[in-house]
Image (spheres, grey):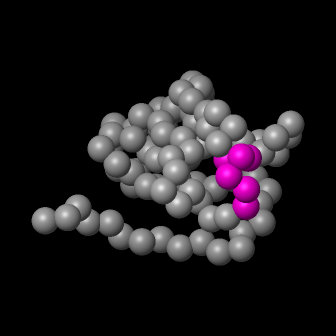
Amino acid sequence: MEYAAQPRPSWAAYASVVNPQHPRPERAAYVGCDNDRYSRTGWGPISLHYDDGQLVMTRGSLRLLSAPLPGQPSDVYFEGLATWRGIALFPFRPAP
């Protein structure tokens, strides 16, 4: 996932292959964007979660972006400049 502030705030998703000797992806392929949903929904928290083969970004009940992901991620990396007002991790278990 990549955030861009200009010309309008937006998110894009890229797929990459992990090399265990280099945590940063060497190549990435564009797989989708938020189609301006992020900037049109104003300010507020976003959520990232894995759902049935997709990495999904939502704000409230609105799906901003989804990207194919063959399995749940085992590692998550953040890179670049950001202002964090809060971050929380919640374990998710499917309903019985």
For this orientation, the residue located farthest to the left is 96
Q: Compared to 92, does 62 lie above or below?
A: above
Q: Residue 37 at what x, y percent from top left?
A: 65, 42
Residue at the image position 33 percent from the left and 40 percent from the top = 53
**Quarter-wise, where is residue 24 in the image?**
top right
- Toward the viewer: 77 or 9? 9
Is 75 placed left or right of 46 in the picture? left
Image quarter (top left, top right, bottom left or bottom right) of the C terminus: bottom left
Image quarter (top left, top right, bottom left or bottom right) of the N terminus: top right
Q: Residue 68 at what x, y percent from top left?
A: 42, 34
Q: Residue 4 at what x, y percent from top left?
A: 77, 42
Q: Compared to 80, does 16 lie above or below?
A: above
Can residue 39 be seen by looking at this rendering?
Answer: yes
- Toward the viewer: 57 or 42? 42
Residue at the image position 59 percent from the left and 26 percent from the top = 30
Q: Residue 45 at what x, y percent from top left?
A: 62, 65
Q: What's drawn in magenta, residue-wise?
A: 38-43
Q: Compared to 13, does 62 lie above or below?
A: below
